[in-house]
Amino acid sequence: MMEETTENAGKLSSQKNVAASGHNHHNRYKYLSNYGAGRRFLFFASCFGVYALVAATYAWFVFPPHIGRTDHVSSSSLGCREDNEGSWSIGVFYGDSPFSLKPIETINVWRNESGAWPVANPVITCASFTNAGLPSNFVADPFLYVQGDTLYLFFETKSPITMQGDIGVAKSIDKGATWEPLGIALDEAWHLSFPFVFNYNGEIFMMPESNEIGQLNLYRAVNFPLSWKLEKVILKKPLVDSTLIHHEGIYWLFGSDHSSFGAKKNGQLEIWYSSSPLGTWKPHKKNPIYNGNRSVGARNGGRAFLYDGNLYRVGQDCGENYGKRIRVFKIEVLSKEEYREVEVPFSFEASHKGKNSWNGVRQHHFDVKQLSSGEFIGLLDGDRVTSGDLFHRVILGYASLAAAISVVILLGFLLGVVNCIVPSTWCMNYYAGKRTDALLNLETAGLFSEKLRRIGSRLNRVPPFLRGFVKPNSSMGKFTLGVIVLVGLLLTCVGVRYIYGGSGTVEPYPFKGHLSQFTLATMTYDARLWNLKMYVKRYSRCPSVKEIVVIWNKGPPPELTELDSAVPVRIRVQKQNSLNNRFEIDPLIKTRAVLELDDDIMMPCDDIEKGFRVWREHPERLVGFYPRFVDQTMTYSAEKFARSHKGYNMILTGAAFMDVRFAFDMYQSDKAKLGREFVGEQFNCEDILLNFLYANASGWGKAVEYVRPSLVTIDTSKFSGVAISGNTNQHYRKRSKCLRRFSDLYGSLADRIWEFGGRKDGWDL
């Protein structure tokens, strides 16, 4: 009995010791777990903090403030937001026939009130409607209706509020150069587009697409152009992009039914016929006329037109992506039993600017009319991006960020901060009492629980394996860790670029509803040919550049074939090497604005477009990117001196917009003769002379305007060794001498100062 008691006491003591040992072990595990958790938190917080800082710096450094909008409207506006369907806008074309149409900018239409010299396409954008108080993400599907000398344009406008299409209308009284938004002509509870407008029996009808509700509606104008009434449901089919043709006394309805069994989306076309637009409609015997390849132009791309006795149908090629291009077909046979058409050559003047051109990626709708003057006018919609571009960028962006997070976790494995992929309690039976109810429920699943723990255990062997493969303390290990960190940072920047950086397009800034173009001029010589090649390739892709003029001062000029340009380039070979050649009168320049830009300055096209927009507001001023301040000492100083005085009174013309007639005529005038001679002697200071001339011409008004360039602007002369101003001290002494000389000739600039930050848009800070 005593032995049994002793034995029980020993067992009890042993159990207590085991329990105490387990308790101590558990406390130690808990301590280590808490320590490890704190270490992991600090590691991840540090990594993600650094990545966030790098991403924010990258976005601030690289992206203009308007990025993420498809046009430049008030930041408080609802309109012109990026849209997954695209950023469609509408341009106008003129010609002697539907097959010889040229964009409006080629015929040099000027509009003083909007600073458009000349007017450039597109003439209607989302900004046109948004700034008129009618928020729009894009405008597309233009249909023209002509009443005498007044043009009415009906089109789809996508509302950023309802995210569906409505039918908008605008009016022009100057043959399409200027459009006044009138309002929303038709707004239903469903999506509307393709507003086919026509006359019938002395009344005006509209047949918009409304396939969302499975029928084709016909509306009659009650109070043209803004009030319409549903006249009749003419067909109970969800037809898309339907158009009517009146031919040989019969009305023919062309449309695509993508809902029918076996129909190929964007590759199907049906024809229906009736004695009246009101119906009843009968199907063509050959239906479907097309049902196959999306690139054949089956889907309608606008109104059919009659020219030279021939009937033509407009189709859209959707082969590469939706609405890629326009195709035109001559209808050879159209009867109740037969239909035959053949494609004819048709194209618009192609832009080589890609995404920076308003219709550089897609154009899918065309309408043409003959005006009373006999001239033909065509309206075309175009886009800079493909359909679904926004969705694809967001997916790629978040995928890149997810990959960056994975890189951080990998880094944690290699550094020993992260020791397991899944919690260890999911993998083994240690400390079962501390597991969650969810885990205990999993254990009751038996075989599933065992498999789950086995998979988790195998996954948790990965971190030790990686640390054995890449040893962090070795030189190679440290190099590997550095590469991994850089890859993570790169993936973060890529993700931010896709999500925040927009579509990669550069868009012009409209002024009073119009866009315009300018001539880019640069002065160079044979030793700087490599600069010129980069210069032409870069700036010819800027949206508003119409032509590049190269003022060739010395040496044999290059062949035009050596220059990769998206716009015409003209090389003007000078008889002598003089800086006065920069402002030589050139009657071949067709635009009012000229941007004088040195060939060694590389700045983003968006900066150029901002400068052009500011100049259009103030064409009487020199508008540029490099300010200077001249005080009473007449000592030439860098921009830092102007910043210290919080103002400027001079703009360097190495990067400045000017009125070609005003500036060049003034520079070549008799009044400037002594100044030009001094420029020739010093081989310097032509830009300073022009500033003095502008100041004289402006009286006490403001003669110069500053636009701040972005931080990514580069001066390539620092790498070439052929800059005129290579010796800074000598260069500044010469320019100080010029300041004193020109002050004697034309008066001082020191009594003028214009403060930074005077613009509401903040572009001059």
Image (cartoon, grey):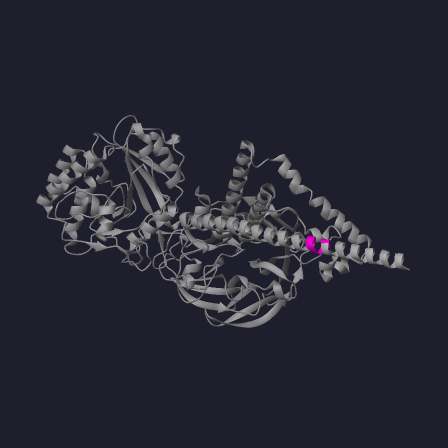
Quadrant that contains the C terminus: bottom left
Q: Which residues are magenta?
A: 21-25
Comparing 220 with 292, the one in front is: 292
Q: Position of residue 342 (x, y in %)?
A: 58, 45
Comparing 29 with 228, the one in front is: 29
Q: Position of residue 213 (x, y in %)?
A: 63, 66
Residue at 66% x, 47% y is 420
Quadrant that contains the N terminus: bottom right
* Image-quadrant location for residue 683: top left
Magenta span dominant secondary structure: helix
Is residue 168 shown above or below 577? Answer: below
Q: Position of residue 100 (x, y in %)?
A: 44, 46
In the picture, measured across the screen, residue 555 lies left or right of residue 293, that is: left
Q: Residue furthest top?
A: 556
Residue at 47% x, 49% y is 55
Residue at 48% x, 44% y is 347
In the picture, measured across the screen, residue 652 lies left or right of residue 170, that is: left
Q: Position of residue 502 (x, y in %)?
A: 47, 51
* Image-quadrant location for residue 762: bottom left
Comparing 740 with 142, the one in front is: 740
- Examine the rendering and report whether any part of residue 663 can be seen: yes
* Image-quadrant location for residue 414: top right
